[in-house]
Amino acid sequence: IILYVELYACCIEYLILESDNLSKLFPNVHLSIGGLTINSHVFFAILTTLVVMPTTWLRDLTCLSYISAGGVVASILVVICLCWIGVVDHVGFENKGTALNLPGIPIAIGLYGYCYSGHGVFPNIYSSLKNRNQFPSILFTCIGFSTILFTAAAVMGYKMFGEATESQFTLNLPENLVVSKIAVWATVANPITKYALTITPLAMSLEELLPRSQQKYSNIILLRSALVVSTLIIALSVPFFALVMALIGSLFAMLVTYILPCACFLAILKAKATWYQTATCSFIIAVGVTCACVGTYSSLSGIVQNYAT
């Protein structure tokens, strides 16, 4: 349940990301239906949902892997664009901010956790591999490469924009530059390519709950479409990108990454675990619980404050 809720929350985050970036590109877009006016944020969230919905109808993870590969290219391109703007377009790396911002640490914990979330797709990826012995090396390579990208974006973004850094650095980029537009469009393309692969494990688990006589493709399409629409409704209800990201990272990623693996390891081995393994796992669980509690409280408080204002 925790794995699937984490994936579901990531899909909500994708829609918020799309809405924020597309509304920056086209801030004056709106739609009037009778007496109801839909602003650019809501319009692009709905539009993104309609675009990604057909990709969720694919049941073959091999096909989805080719689509999600576009997300990898887009992620690399965004970081390259950030570097280009700082070096070639002379935005510079001169901004100075506070070296240590203690009040921001709880939110930062959640953001760091979110960077390594999405574990629910691992079993499906593993089962779809032709050579499953390659899975450990694939996992190590992906996490290592992702860490390099995250670090590069974090350091360059902070040195360029300092305390003014937005929840998405693409919102900080100068609007008059061509590279800025490339970065924003790459960010827009990224969630579209990843959404289907992220939601598929949850969709497949729900399909298994249907009676066998009802597991028709038409019913599956309806189920998956309803799932996508539900993420849209929540994304429109809680449109706070950084706070939602921090909540996912603090609550779900900490559980899946730190707490549960160590707890399961100790529960399975029981008396066979050495004192060193027991002490290490206990320490990791304690750190995970502390970070989860602090980060979750901080992000929920931020969401409540945003609603209050």
Image: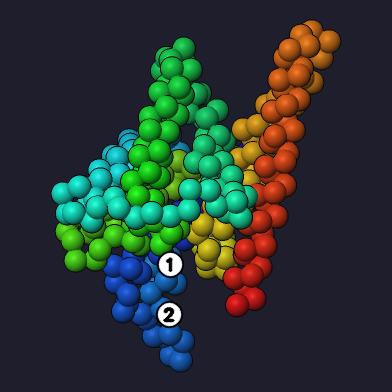
Compared to residue 144, the image places residue 14 above or below, namely below
Identify which residue is drawn at 73% across, 39% down. Answer: 289
Residue at image x 36%, y 80%? 30
Instruction: Kindly identify which residue carries mark 1.
Output: 46
Q: Position of residue 240 (x, y in %)?
A: 53, 63
Q: Is residue 301 above or below residue 152?
A: below
Element assignment for label 1: helix
User: In the displayed structure, does residue 21 sit left or right of residue 200?
Assistant: left
The structure residue drawn at horizontal position 73% and vertical position 26%, both measured from the top left corner, is 283
Q: Are marks 1 and 2 in contact (CB under 8 Å)?
A: yes
Q: Say which of 148 and 125 sits in front.
A: 148
Q: Is residue 5 visible?
A: no
- Whether residue 309 is visible, yes or no, is yes
| Amino acid identity at mark 1 | Ile
> Relative to 277, does residue 47 appear above or below in the rendering?
below
Q: Residue lying at the far right in this picture: please name it.
A: 271
Rendered residue at 57%/36% (across/down): 120
Q: How is the image coloured?
A: rainbow
Tell me which label, 1 or 2, sits earlier in the chain. Answer: 2
| Residue 173 lies in quadrant | bottom left
Q: Which residue is mark 2?
A: 38
Q: Amino acid at mark 2?
A: Ile
Circle 1: is it few (<14), some (14-19), or many (20+) Cα within 10 Å?
some
Find residue 122 and report its horizontal and vertical position in percent.
52, 30
